[in-house]
Amino acid sequence: MIPFAKAYRHYIKNTQHCDNHFGFDIRRLASVEPFLQFLYTDWWRVQFTGLETLPKEGPCLIVGNSNGLIPWPAFMLMYALMCQDNPRRLTIVADMDWIEDERVHSYLLQLGFVPWSSTNLKYLFSKGELVAIFPEYLAAASKPFSERYRVREFDWTRLLPAIEEGTAIYPMATIGCDEASPTLVNLDSLSKFLGMPAYPVTPFFPWFPFPANLATLPVKWKMSALKPTPYEVHSNRDTLEDTAKSQSRFVEGQIQAELNRLLRKRIKTLI
């Protein structure tokens, strides 16, 4: 904890006021920081652009694409925000009902995960927190490698709490994650039998024992945070839902367009 305190003193200072209502424990984050640093700088060699577009204070919702049951882009965003000149703490709101092991559930809460609900999101916004969601969720976990970087349709209800509160929405695109942990096939029948949201077969899972089955390939990542998407704030319920639906499609389109741009740029560098 002492080396962490020295290296991230600005992060600790800037996040002392943050709400710990859901169980966040900075000591738990300190214990995994070396692993996050290794993934970010050495294994995936993440190049992150657009972090300066995110607000220095106040609430905002970051919406990104992902792949698999483990939202690795969320962890890389968390680490990138820790290392900024003006660091901020990130809260990741995700579906956690399928996690039956209380130890895993508690571990994720201590790292900054929060179970998905409209009430939880609004609470975090009221506390001025920086929040990230990945609306593809199960669709991303079961997406085959042949459909990598094709963003699945977003669940518009995930953006509705932000629309209701007038919170700024920032799209974020990531390439590399689909190739680092490629889903060869999703065994849907087996996932239903085991009570899991998905059963993605990767080059490592389920062939290797835990934790080796969570291994990933050392593919270079590029992450890009985009400018916030404008929208009008309304009080009418029907209008709010229509705005959430249109914003969901718009953000999904922005992320897909940025993924395409990053992929074209990567191809040009290889030619």
Image: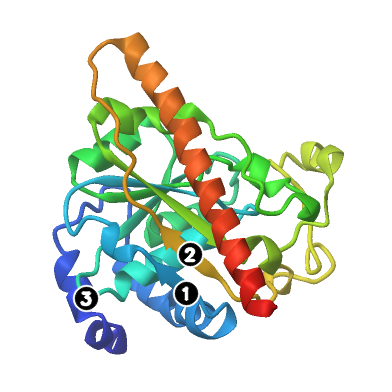
CB-based contact (under 8 Å), mark 3 and mark 1: no
* Residues at marks 3 and 1, CA–CA distance in whole angstroms: 17 Å
Report whether residue 218 is seen. Answer: no
Q: Return the x and y of residue 195 as percentages of the image width and height.
A: 73, 39
Q: Which residue is mark 1?
A: 47
* Secondary structure of the residue carrying numbered label 3: loop
CB-based contact (under 8 Å), mark 2 and mark 1: yes
Q: Residue at x 58, y 41 (%)?
A: 136
Is 44 on the left-hand or right-hand side of 7? right
Report the front residue among 254 and 211. 254
Whether 71 is drawn above or below 216: the answer is above
Q: Quadrant of the N terminus?
A: bottom left
Q: Residue at x 32, y 33 (%)?
A: 162
Q: Residues within 10 Å of mark 3 (few under 14, many from 20)?
A: few
Q: Nearer the viewer, mark 2 or mark 3?
A: 2
Q: Which residue is mark 2?
A: 223
Q: Return the x and y of residue 88 as percentages of the image width and height.
A: 25, 63
Q: Which residue is mark 3?
A: 85
Q: Residue at x 14, y 71 (%)?
A: 13
Give the numbered dot on residue 66: none
Q: Residue at x 25, y 37 (%)?
A: 167
Whether 32 is drawn above or below 102: the answer is below
Q: Nearer the viewer, mark 3 or mark 1?
A: 1
Looking at the rendered structure, the kind of residue marked 2 is Met
Is 87 on the left-hand or right-hand side of 261? left
Q: Return the x and y of residue 18 as percentages of the image width and height.
A: 19, 56
Mark 3 or mark 1, earlier in chain = 1
Looking at the rendered structure, the kind of residue marked 3 is Asp
* Residues at marks 2 and 3, CA–CA distance in whole angstroms: 18 Å
Mark 2 or mark 3, earlier in chain = 3
